[in-house]
Amino acid sequence: MKNLINWRLFFILLIVCVIASLLVLPYALELVSSEDEITAINLLLVAAQNLVMFAVVIFFGLLLSKQIGMGLPILQGALEGENKTKEFKAILLPSVFWGVLAGVLIILFSLPFNKLIPELNSSEAAPAVWKGFLASFYGGIAEEVLLRLFVVSLIVWITFKIKKTVDGRPTNFGIWLAIILSAILFGIGHLPATAQIVSLTGLVVVRAILLNGIGGILFGWLYWKKGLESAIIAHFSADIVLHVITPTVLLLFR
């Protein structure tokens, strides 16, 4: 049990994910037009629920990713005493670039849907910029832990048990299957929030899967090639474009 996973990494991820789940509350409550107040009891309940969920997700994510050669190579290496400064600098700007690109592509692909579904352009669909900034930590960290570290690793592990390469590694087919399926789940996971703004039609579902799938596939690819740190940086950068920079620009030109 002691050597199953890196327990220091486990607790770091757990604490950060729970904090991120609290930071997203102002954004989430406004998005669903909720009049609920953020009280100490509400914060404790959210923290407790996410503590349990992410404890399970992170444990199995670290366990499975270790078996398939994925994970968090930079952070884990640093916790084990290695100097990972060079590796971090090497992924930082490329990860930001891919994240910004994902954000821009999502905006461009959303334009036709905005014309077809005018309800999406309502002011209620755009929470305050500061709330979007706080929510970006949840997207960048918690969602990547859930969807990439856990879901992608789980699907890759399952396919790995069924078929592996001659040198004992997961197949590219298994990895891409995991990336695509997790991206679809990523899109479906956004539907409950979207349902608070507009009725769920086939077009709305397609929009959610397509737009979120752009980011999901890119973040999954980065997780595979560079590690979860790269996917986190990219996802956070994309959310900053979507929830901070874009709303700010729109306000300036309104």
Image (cartoon, rainbow, N blue to C red):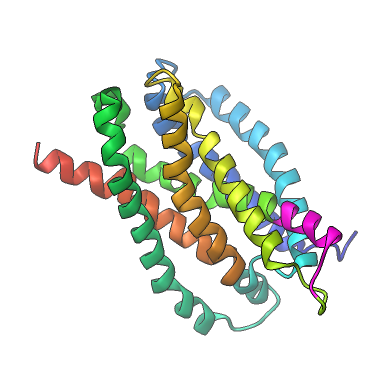
Q: Which residue is more in the foreground, 1 or 87? A: 87
Examine the residues drawn in magenta and state their main secondary structure: helix
Residue 254 visible in the displayed image = yes
For image coordinates 81% across by 79% down, the residue present is 167
Instruction: Please name whichever residue, 22 or 105, is drawn nearer the observer in this view of the structure.
Output: 105
Residue at position x 31%, y 41% from top? 110
Quadrant including the N terminus: bottom right
Q: Is residue 235 above or below residue 20?
A: below
Is there any visible trace of residue 15 in the rendered image? no
Front-most of 238 and 28? Answer: 238
Q: Position of residue 87 (x, y in %)?
A: 53, 81
Residue 52: quarter of image: top right
Q: Residue at x 46, y 44 (%)?
A: 212
In the figure, 246 relative to 120: above or below? below
Residue 219 is situated, as x and y percent measured from the top left of the image, at: 51, 58
Rendering quarter of residue 132? top left
Q: Give the residue drawn at x 61%, y 47%.
A: 182
Q: Position of residue 160 (x, y in %)?
A: 80, 62
**Left or right of residue 81: residue 105:** left
Region in magenta: 153-165
- Classify 75 as above or below 34: below
Q: Is residue 149 left or right of residue 87?
A: right
* Residue in front for this viewpoint, 237 or 104: 104
Q: Quadrant of the C terminus?
A: top left
Residue furthest to the right in view is 1
User: Residue reaching furthest top?
Assistant: 35
Is 185 included in the stretch rendered in magenta?
Answer: no
- Side of 56 relative to 30 (left or right): right
* Residue 234 located left or right of residue 153: left
- Count of number-bearing discs: 0
Check residue 161 for magenta coloring.
Answer: yes
Percent across and percent down for residue 251 are: 15, 39
